[in-house]
Image: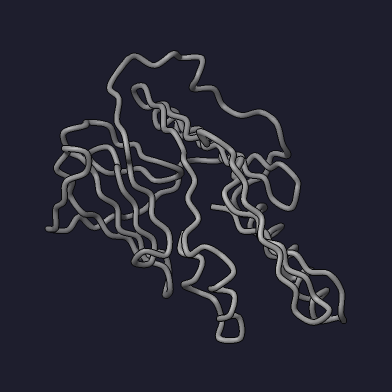
Amino acid sequence: MDLHRNLPPERQEMKDMIPQYNTAVFELYFQDLESIYQPKKADETEVTTNSGNSQMTMRFGRDNRVVYKNLETDVMIDSRDFMQKQFLITGPPTVRKWKIGTKQKEILGHKCMEANFRVDSVTTLVAWFAPDISNSNGPADYQGLPGLILGVDINEGLRTITATEIKMEQVDPAIIEAPTKGKEVTAEEFEAIRKEKMKEMQLQHGGGPGPQMMIIRN
């Protein structure tokens, strides 16, 4: 994630205080049409800045997100830690109407093809999939292409996911286990909770001086 990209003009001085990029390492295990995407390690870097009566703490790198998918049974469970609470976002895998392009590039020796999807007026996705790995899965909630997704680019480098190692070997079925801890909600319910909490934080920030906290996670 490029942490400098969306800093507002009044926060430009923060570029000298925080690293430009936040990087986390995840692993994707898949067998047939079942998979799990989870963090490999949980390192954390914390940076605190002070401005007047406000304090802002940014924690980078620690991400407890786990995404389980079964494309055969049309089930996805996205386990996320939000505002110190664990949620299980359950429902079918995210459907995207990918548009396969003509560009190609090599990732770890695999010739990958480009696919594009426009989420909304401000968000675009570019996925790179390997047709020679005949699995329609991919990292996080990305899937639905004729080959394993080895790379994703959100908004031209704002966030990127890139495979750094591929091992084609037998997977222990016990590894691909759906998460069970947390409050079960739908994607719509989680989005409503997220918007409400962000609104509360904005109101607190505008209501008067006091300590403020921002937590950035991948």
Q: In screen coordinates, is 35 left or right of 168?
A: right
Q: In screen coordinates, is 52 left or right of 174?
A: right
Which residue is nearer to you in this view: 140 or 5? 5
- In the image as oriented, which residue stretches furthest toward the front? 16
Q: Where residue 165 sits: x, y (%)?
A: 31, 34
Task: State whether residue 49 is above or below residue 26.
Answer: below
Q: Where residue 14 sits: x, y (%)?
A: 59, 74
Q: Please give the name of the residue rendered at 34% of the width and 14% of the height, measured from the top-left corner.
A: 170
Q: In screen coordinates, is 41 left or right of 143?
A: right
- In the image as oriented, which residue stretches furthest toward the bottom? 9
Visual colour scheme: one colour
Q: Please give the name of the residue rendered at 87% of the width and 81% of the height, measured from the top-left corner.
A: 208
Q: In screen coordinates, is 83 left or right of 93?
A: right
Residue 50 lies in quadrant: bottom right
Task: State whether residue 45 is above or below residue 165.
Answer: below
Q: Please give the name of the residue rendered at 36% of the width and 39% of the height, measured from the top-left corner.
A: 138
Count of numbered circles on the image: 0
Q: Where residue 210 sits: x, y (%)?
A: 87, 74
Q: Please give the name of the residue rendered at 21% of the width and 43% of the height, measured from the top-left corner.
A: 107
Which residue is nearer to you in this view: 191 or 84? 84
Q: Where residue 189 sits: x, y (%)?
A: 67, 53
Task: State whether residue 102 is above or below residue 12.
Answer: above
Residue 171 lies in quadrant: top left
